[in-house]
Image: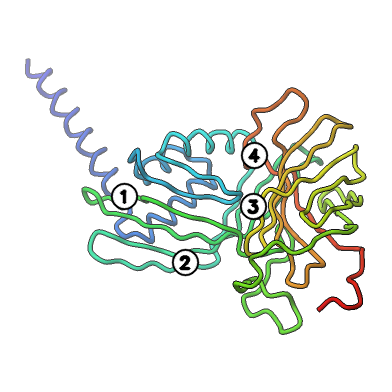
């Protein structure tokens, strides 16, 4: 009996030590919690992400490309797919500001979400310059992320990141209210897929719909707001389709952004973050002489 009691006591001491270690590893402030979440994402550490994010069923969050998450399971499913489909993830934080009031904290953050997809010489690197905002709550002494929203902070996706102090001669990245209406984008455009250096031409109507010279392709515009131009593409020639999101320059002559697959042949379960690459669009049709 004495040996059994010693064993039980030793077991209790071990469990207490593990519990104390777990408590000690919990972030003591919201900024530490945020940085741990970003690091967990980069390290594909889903258990840590799960611990640091609230699982309330009615929490709503938003990501790039119009994606909306309600509750934890939907986000967890996409992150599992993202981790499976990327060779490596790097997420350097370029700016982070946190405000705290009691058990509530909120933050703004800028980071470069960098994905590596493929093997060997075929590895493709894509940089997504993002800005994020979010709210955390301290529950039972633990800081957890409640809700968040992320968007692109730069038109030059996958390329040189735009500086906040852009010169007067460069395109501004923040549009005014007058630019929210869909501009006339009719005409001929040169499309460059940056990573593969593929070039082809698209002929669009004023609503942003029309064919392009790549496997009998066609663009369809689905949404335009604040110069953010979104749509779909289809290529019957190689039986593929997907989506795109680009930011149109203020003068309407250029657009930069990303494209991705939604279907390749019979393969339809492609993760939304499985981007095909980055786009650079340039309008070839000159503006009419009387255009303002």
- Near mark 2 (Cα within 10 A), the count class, few <14, some 14-19 or many ≥20, is some
The answer to which of marks 3 and 1 sits earlier in the sequence is: 1
User: Furthest-front residue in view?
Assistant: 290
Q: CA distance from mark 3 to mark 2?
A: 18 Å
Evaluate if marks 1 and 4 touch, with contact meaning CB atoms under 8 Å apart: no
In the picture, measured across the screen, residue 246 lies left or right of residue 101, that is right
What residue does disc 2 label?
96
The answer to which of marks 1 and 4 sits earlier in the sequence is: 1
What residue does disc 4 label?
86
Residue 94, labelled with which disc? none
Q: Tell me the quadrant of the picture where the C terminus can be found.
A: bottom right
Q: Tell me the quadrant of the picture where the N terminus can be found.
A: top left
Any part of residue 125 in sight: no
What residue does disc 1 label?
26
- Near mark 3 (Cα within 10 A), the count class, few <14, some 14-19 or many ≥20, is some
Callout in the foreground (1, 4): 4
Callout in the foreground (3, 1): 3
Q: Residue at x 69, y 44 (%)?
A: 275
């Amino acid at each position: 009996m004495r040996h059994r009691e010693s064993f039980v006591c030793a077991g209790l001491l071990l469990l207490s030590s593990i519990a104390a270690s777990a408590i000690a590893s919990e972030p003591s402030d919201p900024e530490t919690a945020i940085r741990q979440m970003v690091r967990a994402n980069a390290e594909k550490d889903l258990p840590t992400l799960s611990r640091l994010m609230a699982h309330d069923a009615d929490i709503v969050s938003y990501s790039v490309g119009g994606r909306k998450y309600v509750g934890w399971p939907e986000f967890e499913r996409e992150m599992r797919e993202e981790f499976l489909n990327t060779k490596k993830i790097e997420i350097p934080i370029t700016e982070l500001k946190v405000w705290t009031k009691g058990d509530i904290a909120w933050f703004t953050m800028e980071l470069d979400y960098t994905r590596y997809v493929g093997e060997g010489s075929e590895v493709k690197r894509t940089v997504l310059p993002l800005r994020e905002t979010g709210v955390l709550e301290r529950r039972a002494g633990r800081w957890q992320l409640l809700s968040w929203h992320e968007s692109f902070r730069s038109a030059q996706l996958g390329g040189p990141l735009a500086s906040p102090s852009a010169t007067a001669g460069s395109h501004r990245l923040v549009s005014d209210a007058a630019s929210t209406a869909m501009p006339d984008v009719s005409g001929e455009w040169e499309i460059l897929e940056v990573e593969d250096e593929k070039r082809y031409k698209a002929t669009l109507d004023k609503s942003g719909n029309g064919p392009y010279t790549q496997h009998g392709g066609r663009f369809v515009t689905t949404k335009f707001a604040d110069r953010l131009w979104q749509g779909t593409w289809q290529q019957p020639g190689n039986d593929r389709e997907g989506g795109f999101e680009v930011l149109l320059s203020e003068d309407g002559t250029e657009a930069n952004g990303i494209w991705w697959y939604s279907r390749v042949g019979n393969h339809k379960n492609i993760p939304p973050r499985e981007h095909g690459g980055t786009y650079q669009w340039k309008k070839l049709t000159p503006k009419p002489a009387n255009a303002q």
